[in-house]
Amino acid sequence: MKAVTNLLNENHHQIETPCYLYSVSQVAENFSQLKSALGTELIYSMKANNNIDLLMRCAHHLTGGIEIASIGELNLVAGGTSEKYINNPSADKKFLRAAVASRSTIIIDNLTQLTSLIEFVGKRPLKPILLRLNSCVLKQFNPEIKKIRADQFGMDWDTACQAIDICKSHNTPLAGFHLFNGSYQFTSNAVETAMAAKSIIQAIETRYQQALSFVNLGGGFSENWQQSNFDFSAYREVLASFQKHISLAHETGRGLMASAGYFATRVRYLKNIEQQQYAICDGGINQNFLLAQTENSFRKFKTPMIWSSKPHTQQQSCIYVGSSCSKDDVIGKQDQHHITPKVGDICIYDNCGAYNASYTLSPFLKLPSAKTYIIE
Ligand SMILES: Cc1ncc(COP(=O)(O)O)c(C=O)c1O
């Protein structure tokens, strides 16, 4: 937040609103902190934020590579030198071909993907693949696993065994497997997942009759994972007991990007309806759908930090609304103990670096999309 307010203090006219501001140093700090907390390689999941200017500025920090979920994402980073992992259950032949051409590691979701990959690759070199295992496999290898919401990703154990046999009979190189229990799920099953993974390595190596080399244990870190009381040191000890020939990795999107991003709008008008003050801003649900929380049954709106060119001290409750005609275009709220905004003030929302910019409605009403600024 300090970097954002410094920028505004210097010259707030240089910022067009609505906009996103992303801090390269915050991404770098989040990356190095999470990587050391885990003691493994860390892969960045591009779906959280695919802003190419930000990614180019952060590329040398993100040393674990990048997980890509669409051909559009791949096209953005295909020329880069980062290790690329392709992961999408709906990846079609076109995407798989592009993945092979860009020397990416393919995470195979199902048997049809595997057989069509083998068919068109022929004798061309293929980076050793990973099998995506559905979380249901974990329970089979560790009965201590707590409930994980069922999903459509990856293979159950029987299918994984068929995939291993296909790799074996076609000499298709298999590096290992990939797990992901869901966003925000890391702490609920971290140790149990790791224990299951250790046994799965053994079972796959026995069936494949060759050693594996790589396992991605997944992720699911929250935006403010630094504040959780998860015992990372005990977790690292569990990981230290893994087979030495296996390199381990985790992956994250929001754990790196969320706290590195801010969303800013300017107050255009202030008005009261009966006793309630509203600040009508130049951006809202169109550019930042997630702040409007329309998908939550209990909306707990964020309170923006108000930046003003002439600081004032008056306090009042306020509801911050955007520029669309939707009743749901409410993105912030404050109680009577916060500084009341003035027309022209800039409202800054923190923790907006992951998914906020991409998971949104921009084309509605042909309203302008948010600008992006990269800050140090
Ligand atoms: C396989 C996989 N990896 C990583 C992520 C990133 O999740 P998060 O941003 O919560 O870390 C997702 C999110 O959908 C995912 O499906």
Image: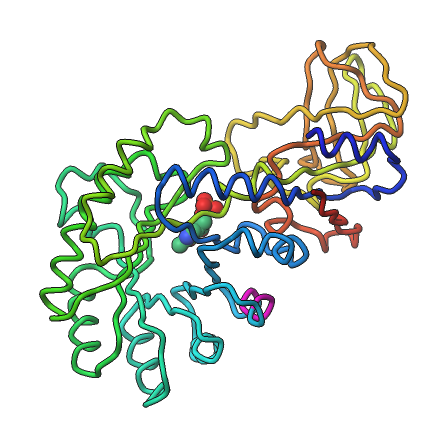
Q: Is residue 313 above or below residue 85?
A: above
**Magenta region, residue range:** 73-77
Image coordinates of residue 169 in percent, x first then y, are 16, 82
Q: Coloring scheme of the render?
A: rainbow
Foreground residue, 134 or 41?
A: 41
Image coordinates of residue 116 in percent, x first then y, are 33, 81
Quadrant that contains the C terminus:
top right
Q: Is residue 201 left or right of residue 44?
A: left
| Residue under the image location 30 percent in, 34 percent down | 188
Foreground residue, 23 or 196?
A: 23
Foreground residue, 127 or 325?
A: 127
Q: Is residue 297 above or below residue 21?
A: above
| Residue under the image location 48 percent in, 52 percent down | 44
Q: Quadrant of residue 333?
A: top right
Q: Give the residue furthest to the bottom.
A: 123
Q: Is residue 367 left or right of residue 194?
A: right
Q: Quadrant of residue 343?
A: top right
- Report if residue 74 lies within the magenta region: yes
Image coordinates of residue 148 in percent, x first then y, are 28, 42
| Residue under the image location 15 percent in, 74 percent down | 165
- Report if residue 208 lies within the magenta region: no
* SS majority, magenta: helix
Q: Quadrant of residue 100?
A: bottom left
Quadrant that contains the N terminus:
top right
Image coordinates of residue 160 in percent, x first then y, are 20, 65
Q: Is residue 276 left or right of residue 192?
A: right
